[in-house]
Amino acid sequence: MTNQKKSLILLYTGDGKGKSTAAFGQAVRAVGHGWQVCIIQFIKANGETGEARSFAGLSDNVEFHVKGTGFLFKKEKREEAKDSARQAFAFAREKIMSGNFQMVILDEFTYLLNYGMVEWSEVKSLFEQRPANVHLVITGRSDNQQLIETADL
């Protein structure tokens, strides 16, 4: 990992299980190389997830943030979820652009695009403007062709 000349965008998508697990494996590997890693969960609302507890005990090299409101796709909760998603995306932008991390994991991020909570133009701009050494790992179900075409892997 340390020999990369340019940072990468890794996308774990599809039906079924294993996307977040694969991303968290990337985090463990990165920490083993001494990297600073930031993990942001976009959908889960409970900060006491097993993943959050595990990473809290593993390393001082990992920041873990749970920024969602839960799986709120009911019509009456959509605006609340959208507001939360916009705030979480702004938070992610700050972390990515800070220069403090070599890897930022955007867990379940594809839902923000799938449900129109953020615009592709904003996402693309962030990806293009990120510091050269920041690898992005994105998870979630998606058939967003623009995201798939943008990813390196």
Image: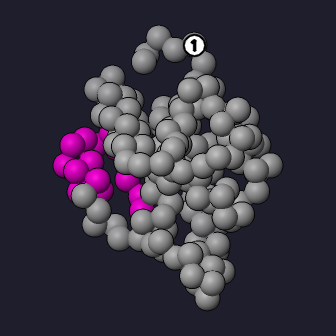
Residue 76 visible? The answer is: yes
- Furthest toward the front, the residue is 15
Vertical placement of residue 49 versus 58, above or below: below
Q: Give the residues in magenta.
A: 51-67
Residue shown at the point (48%, 32%) measured from the top left: 102
Vertical placement of residue 8 versus 12, above or below: above
The local crowd at label 1, few if under 14, some if 14 to 19, many if 20 or more residues have their Cα within 10 Å, is few
Residue 56 visible? The answer is: no
* Side of 9 relative to 18 (left or right): right
Task: Identify residue type, mark 1.
Answer: Lys
Q: To which residue does mark 1 refer?
A: 5
Residue shown at the point (41%, 58%) measured from the top left: 65
* Side of 44 relative to 47 (left or right): right
Query: Which corner quadrant of the image does residue 119 belong to?
Result: bottom right
Residue shown at the point (33%, 23%) measured from the top left: 33
Vertical placement of residue 47 versus 21, above or below: below
- Furthest toward the left, the residue is 57
Residue 9, position as x, y percentages in the image = 58, 31
Q: Is residue 62 magenta?
A: yes
Q: Is residue 102 magenta?
A: no
Residue 49, position as x, y percentages in the image = 29, 62
